[in-house]
Image (cartoon, grey):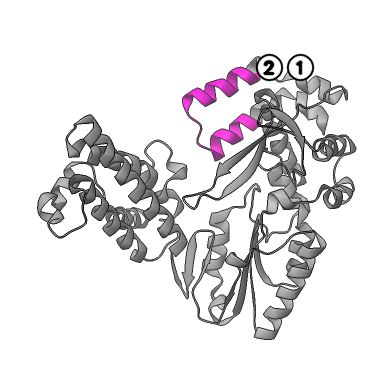
Amino acid sequence: MLEDLLNKNLWQEFLRRKEENEFIGPREKAFWKEHIDSEAYKPICKCICEGRYSFSVPHKHLITKNASGKKRTVYTFSDEEMIILKYLSFLLYRYDYLFSNNLYSFRKGFGVKDAVSFLSRTRDTGRMYGYKLDVSSYFNSISPSILLPSLKDCIDEDLFVLLDTLLEDDRVFYHGEIIKEAKGAMPGTPISNFLANFYLKDLDLYFWNQKVIYLRYADDILLFAHSEEEIKEYSYYLKDYLHSKKLSVNPEKESWIMPGDPFDFLGFSFTGKTVDISSHSVEKIKGKISRKARALRRWFLAKELSPDAALKAMNRIFNSKFYGQDSPEMSWQYWYFPYITTASRLHVIDAYMQQYQRYIVTGRHYKMNYAYCPYDRLKACGYKPLVTAYYEFREEQKE
């Protein structure tokens, strides 16, 4: 397989796939085209194929996950090496046949929207018992000593040697010095997605063979059973399996679902035949709205600008996020609108957005905000409510 590191046709196919499945701007597209046309990848790839290349010591980074301040650890190699690893992750799709069709993460032809479509079509879940869990620090907790022996039996020998070398090297560069630590599946590197899929593939296969309604997306797992006893048995099996892999369940994200109860999965909420945006996703976007509103109020006051300048900036930022003029593939319109069947939580977000746009103008939350900043003023500054956009989208789909 490593011989394909030098296959220019496959590099070009890699770029075509990136253009089809990811949003890449003109500058990034030009970079990749020049890199491939000039075969700039060739020196490193040639050395890898000949067994003469040693990857650099990766850099460790602590990334803030959200407003809670929690950190996650990621690793990066040099720019040149990250390019090679991105291409290698593309080549790893040829091992997709190893995975069951109840795995929806990081696969060709599978994704969040496919999982949501499956749950929308599977009406039986409303009458079943469910169990949902999240694996604690999954990517970082993957054990190379457990992963590598099973990986060796499933992939090309030359590829295995490369992955073995990367995973077994416990050196990382952090705060200006080299330290030693377990890197798990090296989250942050492009190949970590394949490794995370592979590590629990036998668990996926077990439930696939049992014909259980089971879905996994990386570290998120959801399954259903027809009785309380059955769902408990599945939960015991799950926990025992995870323990055998030196993994544990995140107790904050473990939940039991009774028949008829709503449940959340991958940012969506399911209640019978109704699909909505999850409450967690709503709280996340509300946090972003309030933080941005406070920042923009400080900005226009410091610059002695009109409040309308801040309102226009607020709407540019969130219109891009919601409707994606620049990157439609990442927008809420693309992500949520085709699958939700109600505008209930869109109403909540719209009300919150209007509240904080008025706060930008007055610096307060009180009834007089409506007089100081009527709805027409918000509209004149570019505000477009999600509810209106959602119903416009649904009407377009009917045509």
User: Which residue is labeled 1 in the image?
Assistant: 43
Residue 57 marker: none
Residue drawn at x 32%, y 62% as measured from the top left: 348
CA gap between label 1 and label 2 equals 7 Å
Location of residue 19 by image quarter:
top right
User: Which residue is labeled 2 in the image?
Assistant: 40
Furthest residue toward top: 38
* Residue 16 drawn in magenta: yes
Per the rendered image, the range of residues in magenta is 14-36
Residue drawn at x 69%, y 85% as measured from the top left: 229
Q: Position of residue 159 (x, y in %)?
A: 84, 36
In the image, 360 versus 330, the foreground residue is 360
**On the rendered image, what quadrant is the N terminus found in?**
top right
Location of residue 78 by image quarter:
top right
Q: Position of residue 289 (x, y in %)?
A: 34, 49
Q: Left of 66 or right of it: where is 228? A: right
